[in-house]
Image: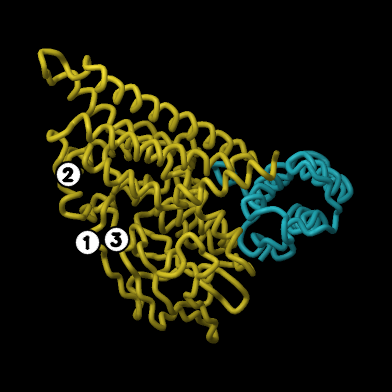
Chain colours: A cyan, B yellow
């Protein structure tokens, strides 16, 4: 779920960055494939009858691996994974060179 | 805590198993009876980074993969489940710091754990066991400090720990704070009559008006405990699962030796069919558990989201397998293994606890059932 050597800072280097639209489309596909349900970008995944906290952790791992980001500290909160839109914002924020150098 | 760029996984990687074998020697039974592992043993292993070997090189760790650390964990589990439990706690503490801490907190704290200080993670309370959303320990901001008030139960490694990662309730939700065990207001009450893993340093912890700097509160604070706790426990579950593989291996070795060496009714025990079945079932349990753990660790190492359920499944398969397998081992060893400190007697008691901690068997089954429903 993280690389053994703890690559957190060296991560976002390779390849062109996908746009927010690409990220949203990829996430909607991922959700559809995992849950066999179509979701809307602003739909709450964890509302009553929705997904479990275990699924939230799957989203954490998926985002880290797919976008070569590290999600920790203040970013590790359920609201960041509640909707596709929120996840797109998180990916965008963590891929950008952090304004405060470490993101905190 | 100067941040070095030491190369990962160089040096002691190959000799790690031998070092544990040497340090434990034939003393696991003695530690079990005394309910204590000598602190210098833990310090030495800790200072070599071997109690949390997955911590990355940038934090002074060995940078083991989950698979490599799993092999080591199983080895230690075959020698002494109490020591393996200490590893589980130390590793889970390092992992929790890495996930809930920001970059600065990670850089300040993780190197202390790879450098020899011992750490525990305190989740459970009297009224909050499987349901950790019921936590009542309070983490209250007071100027540039955080005040910690509450009571934790059954915290593994707490009797040895220098640092305790305490989960509790903040004004904003749920979070975790790093508390020095020596801080005023911390009272550690070792559990001296534990059913299993007797030397794992289990303790109850009282926290009365404990003041720590505000920065000791890890940045990961969420409205609900769910994601934070799930994340922290995943490491613990993986470690327990590998430890149970070790329990089964320890039993298998002891049982085979006994069943081949002892004759009754003119034949080796191993040649009596009802005994042979116990041997087969032990082997099956060990292999099942090992495959489930290898699978989960490989998913962990490749960053697959499937790791989340695979870890729960591995924990469940390994813990139930170890509980059932160690009971069979007791049955075969009979009076030869029926005394405190014997490897099989320890396994029998220790394995039962593994069905209880880090998500009871029933909680694991509920999680797996939810997964089956959600993906059907």
> Measured from the top left, where is residue B87 in percent x and y?
37, 48
In the drawing, does residue B6 fall left or right of residue A101? left
- Mark 3 or 2, closer to the camera: 2
Residue occupied by mark 2: B341
Residue occupied by mark 3: B160
> Measured from the top left, where is residue B55 in percent x and y?
48, 48
Alpha carbons under labels 1 and 2: distance apart = 15 Å
Q: Secondary structure at mark 3?
A: loop
Packing grade of label 3 (10 A; few <14, some 14-19, many >=20) is many
Q: Which quadrant holds residue A32?
A: top right
> Measured from the top left, where is residue B224 in percent x and y?
62, 66
Image point (89%, 49%), residue name: A21
Taking the image as drawn, is residue B141 in sight? yes
Q: Where is B72 relative to B275, above or below?
A: below
Packing grade of label 1 (10 A; few <14, some 14-19, many >=20) is some
Pick the front one: B319 or A58? B319
Q: Where is B68 relative to B287, above or below?
A: below
Give the quadrant of the N terminus of chain B. Answer: bottom left
Image point (34%, 64%), residue name: B162
Q: Same chain for the residues at labels 1 and 2, yes or no?
A: yes
Q: Which quadrant holds residue B299?
A: top right
Pick the front one: A94 or A56? A56
């Amino acid at each position: 779920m993280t690389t053994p050597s703890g690559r957190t800072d060296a991560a976002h280097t390779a390849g062109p960055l996908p746009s927010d639209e690409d990220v949203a489309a990829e996430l909607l596909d991922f959700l559809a494939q995992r849950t066999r349900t179509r979701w809307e970008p602003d739909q709450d995944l964890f509302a009553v009858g929705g997904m479990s906290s275990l699924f939230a952790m799957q989203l954490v791992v998926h985002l880290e691996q797919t976008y070569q980001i590290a999600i920790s500290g203040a970013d590790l909160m359920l609201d960041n994974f509640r909707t596709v839109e929120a996840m797109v914002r998180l990916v965008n924020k963590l891929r950008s060179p952090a304004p405060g150098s470490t993101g905190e | 805590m100067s941040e070095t760029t030491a190369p990962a996984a160089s040096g002691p990687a190959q000799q790690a198993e031998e070092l544990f074998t040497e340090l434990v020697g034939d003393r696991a039974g003695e530690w079990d009876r005394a309910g204590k592992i000598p602190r210098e043993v833990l310090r030495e292993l800790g200072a070599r980074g071997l109690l949390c070997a997955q911590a990355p090189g940038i934090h002074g760790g060995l940078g083991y993969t989950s698979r490599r650390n799993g092999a080591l964990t199983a080895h230690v589990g075959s020698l002494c489940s109490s020591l393996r439990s200490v590893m589980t706690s130390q590793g889970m503490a390092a992992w929790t710091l890495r996930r809930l801490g920001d970059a600065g907190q990670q850089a300040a704290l993780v190197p202390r754990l790879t450098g020899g200080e011992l750490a525990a993670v305190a989740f459970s309370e009297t009224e909050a066991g499987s349901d950790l959303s019921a936590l009542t320990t309070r983490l209250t901001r007071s100027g540039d400090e955080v005040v910690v008030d509450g009571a934790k139960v059954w915290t593994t490694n707490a009797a040895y720990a220098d640092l305790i990662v305490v989960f509790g309730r903040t004004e904003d939700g749920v979070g975790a704070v790093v508390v020095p065990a020596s801080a005023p207001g911390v009272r550690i009450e070792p559990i001296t009559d534990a059913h299993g893993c007797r030397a794992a340093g289990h303790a109850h912890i009282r926290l009365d008006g404990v003041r720590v700097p505000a920065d000791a509160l890890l940045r990961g604070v969420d409205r609900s405990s769910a994601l934070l706790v799930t994340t922290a426990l995943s490491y613990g579950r993986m470690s327990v699962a590998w430890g149970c593989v070790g329990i089964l291996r320890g039993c298998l070795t002891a049982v085979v030796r006994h069943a081949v060496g002892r004759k009754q009714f003119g034949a080796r025990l191993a040649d009596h069919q009802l005994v042979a079945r116990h041997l087969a079932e032990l082997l099956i349990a060990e292999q099942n558990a090992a495959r489930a753990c290898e699978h989960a660790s490989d998913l962990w190492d490749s960053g697959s989201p499937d790791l989340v359920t695979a870890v729960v499944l591995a924990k469940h398969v390994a813990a139930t397998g170890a509980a059932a397998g160690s009971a069979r081992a007791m049955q075969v060893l009979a009076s030869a293994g029926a005394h405190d400190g014997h490897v099989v007697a320890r396994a029998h008691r220790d394995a039962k606890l593994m069905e209880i901690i880090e998500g009871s068997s029933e909680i694991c089954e509920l999680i797996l059932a939810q997964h089956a429903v959600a993906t059907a």
